[in-house]
Image (spheres, grey):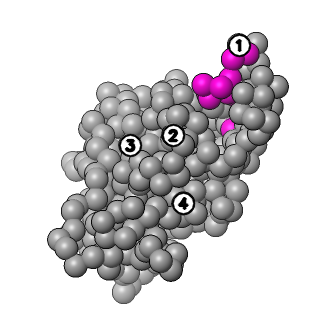
């Protein structure tokens, strides 16, 4: 038992720990199935039948991930048990017999703060467990990414706008040149702004909605159409690292999200029929954006196939791979230049 009377909150740990994230610690991966399900060769050391390559399944339930291996030899070596939860999986992989010790490990591995107060079994925040000075939660560090500290991050947000731009031209020729239909431009509120604004006048404007709130507009980005630099301008004080464009439209409980790195790429994928698309507004992801993506059981990265995009995809894969199931889709060209038929074929649509 911890000196301050805490013990691991196993129920909370089951809900918080991602099975793909735990698998990635062992350098393993399963194939995604329909819904919140994974399947493949059993990764457990108790599995000895090399011919059985699809006997293991893992599924995300309301209380967390559960798994089964239907290999007879594997079941026999585990005393007749077909499967279990994420705690059981970690105990077998670690050869651990103590629930307390495995709970401590999972708390440390994933930077959690899932503890119970000894005596009444109630969850408590770490700061209330003791009057002693508190140590910093362990950061999950990733090459190319800043440290991720889930319990200490300040809840920053972009304030909602107190105005809406009027007379936006959704049928401007520039949009057609980029392959964006009028219907798509109207849906996303994108178009040329002819009004008076030093920042946005004569630019294609893109409304940005907040990712953490109720989907309120928090900024307009402006895209130049005459080749002038910078290509994109954002209003002073706006922090694009806090947002994921189009996240507010993803249905509650969605199990999969597709990540791009630009407004036009997202609109083109939307037109092709790809559901649940969001964009980073750049090739690299912030800590906040990683957290927003980690809530999805499956994430597909479709960043640009250039040096910046590949570097961003590698960093994001490394960071998200600790938290959820991630795959990187290799694109034959820039995503905003792919024909709709090619996009649909990439996603099996």
Q: Residue at x 33, y 32 (%)?
A: 311
> Which quadrant would residue 238 be assigned to in this image?
bottom left
Relative height, residue 12 to residue 65 (above, below): below
Label 2 to label 4: alpha-carbon separation? 15 Å
Label 1 to label 4: alpha-carbon separation? 33 Å
Label 4 to label 3: alpha-carbon separation? 24 Å
Residue 43 on the magenta span = yes
- Asked if labels 3 and 1 touch by Cβ distance under 8 angstroms, the answer is no
Which residue is disc 2 drawn over? 96
Q: Which residues are magenta?
A: 38-49
> Which quadrant would residue 327 be assigned to in this image?
top right
Marked residue nearer the N-terminal end (3 or 2): 2
Which residue is disc 1 drawn over? 50
Is residue 102 or residue 303 the one in the foreground?
A: 102
Q: Position of residue 44 (x, y in %)?
A: 62, 29
Q: Residue furthest top?
A: 51
Which residue is disc 3 drawn over? 319
* SS class, disc 1: loop
Q: Judge depth for marks 1 and 3 and give the one in front.
A: 1
């Amino acid at each position: 038992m911890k000196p301050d009377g805490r013990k691991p909150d196993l129920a909370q740990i089951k809900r918080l720990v991602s099975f793909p994230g735990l698998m990635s610690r062992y350098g393993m991966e399963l194939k995604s199935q329909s819904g919140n399900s994974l399947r493949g060769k059993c990764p457990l050391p108790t599995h000895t039948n090399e011919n059985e390559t699809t006997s293991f399944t893992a599924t995300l339930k309301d209380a967390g991930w559960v798994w089964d291996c239907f290999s007879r030899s594997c079941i026999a070596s585990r005393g007749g048990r077909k499967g279990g939860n994420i705690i059981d999986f970690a105990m077998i992989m670690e050869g651990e017999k103590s629930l307390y010790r495995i709970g401590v490990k999972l708390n440390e591995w994933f930077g959690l703060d899932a503890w119970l107060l000894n005596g009444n079994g109630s969850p408590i925040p770490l700061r209330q467990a003791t009057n002693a000075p508190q140590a910093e939660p362990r950061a999950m560090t990733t090459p190319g990414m800043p440290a991720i500290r889930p319990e200490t991050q300040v809840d920053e947000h972009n304030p909602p706008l107190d105005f809406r731009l009027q007379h936006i031209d959704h049928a401007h020729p520039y949009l057609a040149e980029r392959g964006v239909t009028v219907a798509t431009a109207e849906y996303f509120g994108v178009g040329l702004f002819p009004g008076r604004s030093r920042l946005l006048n004569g630019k294609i404007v893109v409304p940005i909605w907040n990712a953490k709130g109720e989907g309120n507009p928090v900024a307009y980005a402006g895209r130049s159409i005459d080749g002038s630099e910078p290509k994109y301008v954002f209003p002073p004080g706006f922090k694009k690292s806090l947002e994921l464009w189009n996240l507010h439209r993803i249905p509650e409980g969605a199990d999969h999200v597709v990540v791009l790195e630009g407004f036009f790429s997202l609109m083109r994928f939307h037109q092709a029929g790809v559901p649940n698309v969001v964009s980073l507004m750049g090739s690299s992801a912030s800590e906040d954006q990683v957290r927003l993506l980690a809530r999805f059981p499956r994430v597909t990265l479709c960043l640009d196939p250039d040096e910046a995009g590949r570097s961003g995809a590698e960093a994001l894969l490394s960071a998200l791979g600790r938290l959820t199931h991630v795959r990187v889709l290799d694109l034959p060209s820039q995503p905003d230049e792919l024909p709709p038929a090619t996009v649909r074929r990439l996603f099996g649509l």
